[in-house]
C-alpha cells in the first residue's frame, strides 16, 4: 500500500555492500523506499542479501556505496527507534527470568540506572505485551512458552523501546500453522501503527499477507503483490536450480477449508 502523499520512513539509494574487498557484492545497487503504511515482505534465495539488508537498515553494517536514511536520519542515529527480531534468538529455559523481564531487556540503554527499570520502563514493556496479545504471560518463565508465544514475546521485546518501525527476520520459523495465524493477526493490527518489514523464505505466505514484495537476490526489485507471478519467482531463484512455486489462496491457512494450490 503506497498511498499518495505518504512520507518515506526508509529510503535506500544505490546501496552496494560486500563483506570483503573483491568479493561478490552481497547487495548491488539496491534502492528501496518504505512508507509509513507498508507491510513489506522480503524474499529471495539463501545468500541473496536479505539479512544483510536488515543489518544495513539497523546501522550494524555500513555500505561501501550509496545512502541510507531511516526516519530521516542515518540508521545508527535512530537505532533505538527501530524494533528488530533476528532469525535466531536463544532464550535459556533454565533462566529464572519472567516474560516481563525478557521484554524489559528491550529497554536496555534507555535507563540511566543500567539494569534498574523505572515504572515508565515497566509500563512500556507491558504495553508491548498487550500489543502482541500476550499480556497474560508476563509472569511466566520462558520454558513455559509455546513456539508461537515465544515469537510474540520476542516481537514485544523489539517494541518495548516504543519502536517506530519493525524489522522481522524469519519470524514464523518453527511456529505451527495455528500459532502462525495468531502472530500474523497481531502483526496486521500492529501495521496500523507502524511499517513492518518481514523477511521470509515462504513465498506463498508472503504473497498472501503483505502489501508489497521485495525480491532480493543481490539486486532488488519491488512488486505489488498481484505481480508476484511464478515467472518472477523463477527468475529470482534461477541460480538455485528448478523452482516449484506454491500459491496460497486468500484465507489459507487461516481458513482450512480453502485449499492451498501448487503451481509448477
Image (cartoon, helix red, strand yellow):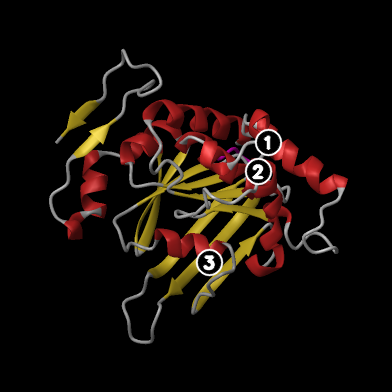
Mark 1–mark 3 Cα distance, whole angstroms, equals 32 Å
Q: Earlier in the sequence, mark 1 or mark 3?
A: 3
Q: Judging from the image, what secondary structure is the residue with disc 1 in?
A: loop
Query: Can you tell which mark lies on residue 138?
Result: 1
- By secondary structure, the bulk of the magenta-drawn segment is best described as loop
Q: Report if residue 191 lies within the magenta region.
A: no
Q: Report if residue 2 lies within the magenta region.
A: yes
Residue under the point 50% across and 27% down: 182
Query: Mark 1 near mark 3, Cβ–Cβ under 8 Å?
Result: no
Q: Is residue 147 depicted above or below 58 in this figure?
A: above
Query: Mark 2 near mark 3, Cβ–Cβ under 8 Å?
Result: no
According to the image, label 2 marks what residue?
Answer: 98
Mark 2–mark 3 Cα distance, whole angstroms, equals 32 Å
Q: Residue furthest bottom?
A: 21
According to the image, label 3 marks what residue?
Answer: 56
Residue under the point 69% across and 65% down: 73
- Is 51 in front, or is 225? 51
Amino acid at each position: 500500500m503506497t498511498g499518495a502523499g505518504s512520507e518515506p520512513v526508509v529510503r535506500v539509494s544505490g546501496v552496494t555492500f560486500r563483506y570483503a574487498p573483491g568479493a561478490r557484492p552481497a547487495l548491488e545497487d539496491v534502492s528501496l523506499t518504505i512508507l509509513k503504511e507498508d507491510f513489506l515482505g522480503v524474499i529471495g534465495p539463501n545468500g541473496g542479501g536479505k539479512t544483510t539488508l536488515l543489518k544495513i537498515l539497523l546501522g550494524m553494517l555500513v555500505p561501501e556505496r550509496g545512502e541510507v536514511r531511516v526516519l530521516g536520519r542515518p540508521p545508527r542515529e535512530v537505532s533505538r527507534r527501530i524494533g528488530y527480531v533476528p532469525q535466531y534468538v536463544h532464550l535459556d529455559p533454565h533462566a529464572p527470568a519472567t516474560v516481563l523481564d525478557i521484554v524489559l531487556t528491550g529497554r536496555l540503554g534507555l535507563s540511566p540506572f543500567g539494569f534498574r527499570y523505572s515504572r515508565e520502563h515497566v509500563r512500556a514493556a507491558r504495553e508491548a505485551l498487550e500489543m502482541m496479545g500476550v499480556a497474560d504471560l508476563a509472569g511466566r518463565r520462558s520454558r513455559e512458552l509455546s513456539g508461537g508465544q515465544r515469537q510474540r514475546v520476542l516481537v514485544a521485546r523489539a517494541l518495548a523501546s516504543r519502536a517506530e518501525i519493525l524489522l522481522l527476520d524469519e519470524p514464523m520459523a518453527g511456529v505451527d500453522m495455528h500459532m502462525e495465524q495468531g502472530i500474523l493477526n497481531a502483526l496486521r493490527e500492529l501495521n496500523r501503527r507502524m511499517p513492518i518489514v518481514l523477511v521470509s523464505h515462504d513465498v506463498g505466505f508472503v504473497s498472501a499477507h503483505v502489501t508489497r514484495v521485495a525480491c532480493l537476490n543481490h539486486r532488488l526489485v519491488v512488486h505489488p503483490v498481484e505481480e508476484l507471478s511464478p515467472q518472477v519467482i523463477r527468475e529470482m531463484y534461477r541460480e538455485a536450480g528448478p523452482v516449484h512455486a506454491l500459491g496460497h489462496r486468500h484465507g489459507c491457512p487461516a481458513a482450512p477449508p480453502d485449499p492451498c494450490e501448487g503451481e509448477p
